[in-house]
């Protein structure tokens, strides 16, 4: 079943055409990586799916529903950014519960969800701390937890590991992979890091200049790149 479907999507910033009649179908439960150099339109595409940008043309479907004109909060998506976007004055627990309280969820359901997310992400000992008392990796776990407690169908990640050092990045890659194997949600993951793409993805969409150059399994992209750009980009160190 298709989870996210992008149809003939175009987006301009003024006269700058960033995405050009882009089409993309992502399967239910798939880990799809959007890979490409800085400025190629990865974040723009992700933000269109999230509903954070007004698109110039085209349509977006999530779980079979046309969400092109839906508010971000009604799209069944959770977004995790590179900068963690946690509320600094709130404890970890409050950061996790805040959105659910606003949505009017009963207290015991909120506690149940926080318990589950804290266990999956191994942040139980951190619940009473504030973001300033956490390491970068711990903050990023809490940011993922905020999407997790909302029980969303689709996770959107925009370079979530790029502020972390190499060792932590490698650790969190393994954790993200495990998280996906546990949850089996659809994940769309933006990165310019070839290693991340090759280790995490079920399929990789390689982008250049707002156009998907190749969409294939990592091994296929690695072994049979469709053009010189893909070959060069996958082959070059990050
Ligand atoms: P990536 O995430 O792949 O690095 P982006 O999607 O952020 O690329 O940007 C794609 C292009 O759109 C770039 O040329 C960037 O400068 C431009 N761009 C991004 N956001 C805006 C904006 N809010 N206004 C104008 N131009 C933008
Ligand atoms: Mg970006």
Image: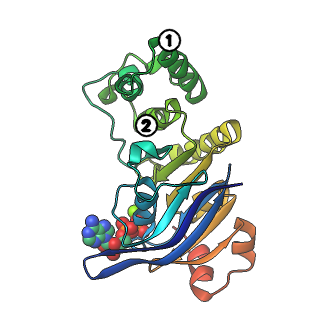
Instruction: Determine whether 150 is above or below 45 in the image.
Output: above
Q: Residues within 10 Å of mark 1 (few under 14, many from 20)?
A: few
Dot 2 or dot 1, earlier in sequence: 1
* In the depicted structure, whether residue 8 falls above or below residue 149: below
Q: Is residue 185 visible?
A: yes
Query: Which residue lies under the disc numbered 2?
Result: 143
Residue beneath the point at 35% across and 55% down: 52
Q: Quadrant of residue 57?
A: bottom left
Measured Cα–Cα span from mark 2 to mark 1: 22 Å
The nearer-to-camera label among 2 and 1 is: 1
Do tag 2 and tag 1 residues touch (Cβ < 8 Å)? no
Front residue of 57 and 77: 57
Observer-nearest residue: 15 or 221?
A: 15
Residue closer to the observer: 199 or 21: 21
Left or right of residue 68: residue 219 = right
Number of other residues with Cα within 10 Å of mark 2, as a class: few under 14, some 14 to 19, many 20 or more: many
Residue 176, position as x, y percentages in the image: 60, 43
Mark 1 residue element: helix
Picture layout, residue 144 above or below residue 23: above
- Residue situated in front as seen by the camera: 198 or 72: 72
Residue at mark 1: 108
Q: How many numbered markers are drawn?
A: 2
- In the displayed orientation, state which residue is furthest to the bottom: 228
Where on the picture, by quarter, is residue 34?
bottom right
Q: Secondary structure at mark 2?
A: helix
When asked about the image quadrant of residue 194, the answer is bottom right
> Is residue 166 something that shows in the picture?
no
* Residue at x-position 59% and y-position 50%: 187
* Residue 202 percent coordinates (x, y): 70, 58
Across and down, in percent, residue 45 comes to 45, 65
Of the four image quadrants, the one with ligand 1 is bottom left
């Amino acid at each position: 079943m298709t989870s996210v479907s992008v149809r003939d999507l175009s987006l301009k910033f003024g006269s700058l055409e960033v995405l050009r009649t882009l089409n993309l179908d992502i399967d239910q439960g798939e880990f799809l990586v959007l890979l490409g150099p800085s400025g190629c339109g990865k974040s723009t595409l992700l933000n269109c799916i999230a509903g954070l940008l007004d698109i110039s043309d085209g349509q977006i479907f999530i779980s079979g529903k046309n969400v092109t004109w839906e508010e971000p909060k009604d799209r069944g998506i959770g977004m995790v950014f590179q900068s963690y976007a946690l509320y600094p004055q709130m404890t970890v627990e409050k950061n996790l519960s805040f959105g659910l309280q606003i949505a009017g969820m009963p207290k015991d359901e909120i506690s149940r969800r926080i318990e589950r997310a804290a266990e999956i992400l191994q942040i139980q000992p951190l619940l009473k701390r504030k973001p300033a008392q956490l390491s970068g990796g711990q903050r990023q776990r809490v940011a993922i937890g905020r999407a997790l407690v909302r029980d969303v169908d689709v996770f959107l990640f925009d370079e979530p590991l790029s502020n972390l050092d190499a060792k932590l990045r490698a650790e969190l890659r393994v954790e993200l992979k495990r998280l996906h194997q546990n949850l089996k949600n659809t994940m769309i993951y933006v990165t310019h890091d070839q290693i991340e793409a090759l280790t995490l993805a079920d399929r990789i969409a390689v982008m250049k200049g707002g156009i998907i150059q190749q969409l294939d399994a990592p091994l296929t992209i690695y072994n049979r790149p469709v053009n010189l750009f893909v070959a060069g980009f996958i082959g070059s160190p990050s």
